[in-house]
Image (cartoon, rainbow, N blue to C red):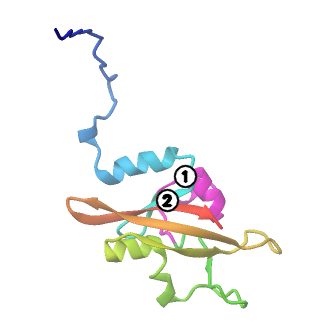
Amino acid sequence: MAHVELSLSEVFVPSAGTPTEQGYDNIGRWSATVSRADEPCLLIDAETLVMAVSAAGCDLLRLGAPEDVIGLPLLDGGLRLLDFTAYRGELAEPEIDKIPPLLALSSGRLARGLLRIEAAAEGAPDATVDAISTPVLADGTVAGSLTFFSEV
């Protein structure tokens, strides 16, 4: 004969002011997650404004503190991308649209690629990072992109 055991526990009741899942949109949920992440990651909206960036992401991308770049356009917020030539020139307009965070926005698909980040200090080596981006959807349309970075 089968034996069934039942136990009861207290119900978790959120404190006043705690937002419920229904209170968040998809960008809001990812923004909260990215802000607290230990991994280097970045969230931008459809207009390429930085919505959230992890502290590790700021360190790797040489952006300063997260609060210094949130709300700024990705490429005007201190991110300095270089081409992979020996000349180390700034990334030109046609290539800029192909970087993973922007490509995920425009294509609505996963995007991956290498980025060369300009050294923060004179004489310091540039950073090369692998970037993997995914579009973030809201009501079935692309509302932003989420990118994870790894130093190469």
Residue 25 image position (x, y, % from top left): 28, 49
Residue 137 image position (x, y, % from top left): 28, 61
Task: Report whether residue 137 is seen.
Answer: yes
Instruction: Please name the residue that numbered disc 2 is placed on.
Output: 42
Residue 82 image position (x, y, % from top left): 63, 81
Task: Tell me the quadrant of the picture where the C terminus can be found.
Answer: bottom right
Above or below residue 87? Residue 106 is above
Q: Which range of residues does the magenta coloring cover? A: 52-74
Residue at x-position 31% and y-position 34%: 19
Report if the CB atoms under discs 2 and 1 are less than 8 Å apart: yes
Instruction: Please name the residue that numbered disc 1 is placed on.
Output: 54
In the figure, residue 8 lies in which quadrant? Answer: top left
The crowd level at tag 1 (other Cα within 10 Å; few <14, some 14-19, many 20+) is many
Q: Residue extending furthest left?
A: 1
Residue at x-position 77% and y-position 72%: 125
Disc 2 from disc 1: Cα separation: 7 Å
